Image: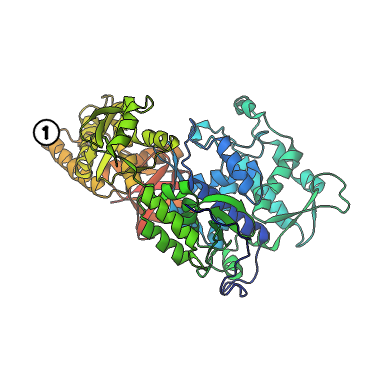
Amino acid sequence: MPRASKTIKAKPARPGAASAAPGRHERSEAFDTFARDLLTFAGHFERVSTKRVATGGIGKKTTQRIAPFLRRSDEEYASFLGVFLIDRRVLFEGEDRWEISRPNLIRLWQPERLLRSVHHFWLRTALWNESLADPDVLSLVRREYISADPGLEARRRRLCEELLAAPEGEAIEIGTLLSRLDRSLQARGRGADDGALSRYGGRVSPATLLRRMLGGPLAWLGLVEPLVRRPPAVSEAEAFRVSPLGRLVLTENWPAIIQSFGTALSDSAARATLQPNLEILAPPDLDPGVYLNLARLGDLRSVDIYTAFAITWDSLMNALDRGFSAGELLAFLESVSATGVPATVRQLVEDCEGRHGEVRIGVAGPYIEAREGTLLGELEANPRFAPYIQRRIGDALALLTSNVDLASLGRELRKAGYSVSSAGTDKVQVTAHGAQLTLTRAEFEEIYAAVRAATKLAREVDPDFDLSALTALEETLALELTRREDTGAPTRAQELESLVEKLLRARGKSAKGKPKAPTEARDSEDIRALLLTAVENHTPMEIEYDGFQGVTRRIVEPSSFDGRYLTGFCRLRQDQRVFNTARILSAKLVS
């Protein structure tokens, strides 16, 4: 493939760049930076497969890789972005890796909605705690690892009240603010939980806590602005001022924010620029869906006025591995480029498609197929790959061992210099309890339904029966269904569970004689128990939910509950939604 000639990076022009977005009268540079960094953080997971750490979070090495590409190159800031994206279910836990939900990200992509969401998250979350000497708790996103701090929300609300009490436009001295807040900052939940916090270095002083609260999410969002004296008296800013945006957010004047910022963070007319040197320049107001596609297609190189991606051999092979054809890739690039697709880019895409599938792997046993018999013989002679090959069944085709991990084998082949593709198949490969199952989609739906029905039957017939193995298998299958967006399996499961109900009634084993379970809950543990009951019995429920638009009452038809997130059809929004149980204030079963 000919090397692309080096070109001078020119600042691309866009149609309509001189005019402001409709309905937008003012901008906040800090907030625009925050939104852009949030998209950069999410884009990393679109391109790079990232494993979860043992406690269910994102490791520090990942944040260290992402932080240099943020406009604020700060690991603590990167950690906050990650915790927020996890809480909002933009990043969610796959089987062992983080996956990204595009609908949840796009749903956030309005100025008022994003400001409201981040502000409410900071006010209430225990996942981010400025009072810890090491506030980075991004790797501890499961609540069982988070130490209780009952005064956390009260401290933050007290700070907001003091900021609003200051005259508009006037500076607020740190010392003055500290004297007013000292008592509430001192009452930071000292007590039995402090021992558990020793691994984070304990708690910080009130003055340090106040600086962190002001210089953290409030400043990152542009709600407060640090004022540095000229010449500076100390190395840190000792005074802050509430910005006009800050007064709107702290008073929760959302209509005024919509009037000032409009209803979109992106510009539908924005286009990227493809350069002959295989670089893609993405403008800051590009549609988030287009940005994530570019992040999947190229390697992130730099973030400045424009975000620069590099189209590489590996990035194109990764896109082809995901099922895209060369024609689809070129059509997408043509649709989002303001300058067309350069010949060098077309040449690289076509070369990659020509080499893609030189060695194919798939689920049929599983098997491996090479384009030439000599190539398969080369693999058989290689001690690195020979243990995977069970027996040869053709000149260029061989069966692999039954317990082979195809993803791992594909990575090893690529490292050795082979071009690998996965054969398209309608079969699903599931690993549970050390066993590997290869099933058609119909078989997969049937086994999931059978496991759910067996769990229900065992629970009703013998409440003391150990359901741990069945429950674990059901969770594994449910996760695979979620990743594949399968809608047929839950329907089939409900049909079988209905049969179980009829069987139990016919044998007199129905739960009618049992004590009546509670139908309403306000305590967090009781709410979780009620959610499980609603999912198991397919019972609609009315919840009081503190969401983007404030506290609302909704009737939800639940479909699944993983202990933290409830998924179901929301009658209020007339759409399938995911609810964070930490934001459910009360729940009640309805008929």
User: Would residue 99 be found to the left or right of residue 216 on screen?
Assistant: left
Q: Secondary structure at mark 1?
A: loop
Q: Is residue 15 visible?
A: yes
Q: Would residue 552 be visible to someone looking at this image?
A: no
Q: Is residue 507 left or right of residue 331?
A: left
- Report the label total: 1
Percent across and percent down for residue 517 are: 31, 38
Residue 180 falls left or right of residue 561: right
**Label 1 neighbourhood size at 10 Å, few (<14), some (14-19), many (20+)?**
few
Residue 247, percent from left and from top: 67, 60
Quadrant assignment, res 131: top right
- The residue that disc 1 covers is 507
Q: Amino acid at mark 1?
A: Arg
* Residue nearest the viewer, comparing 401 with 156: 401
Residue for point 55% across, 54% down: 309
What's the colour scheme? Answer: rainbow
Choose between 525 and 75: the one closer to the eye: 75
Residue 9 place in picture, x, y as percent: 62, 60
Q: As rendered, which of 250 and 95 lies closer to the eye?
A: 95
Q: Position of residue 528 (x, y in %)?
A: 40, 39
Question: Which residue lies most toward the left here?
Answer: 506
Q: What residue do we see at 65% from left, 69% from top?
A: 26
Whether residue 44 sits left or right of residue 236 in the image: it is left
Residue 11 sits in quarter: bottom right
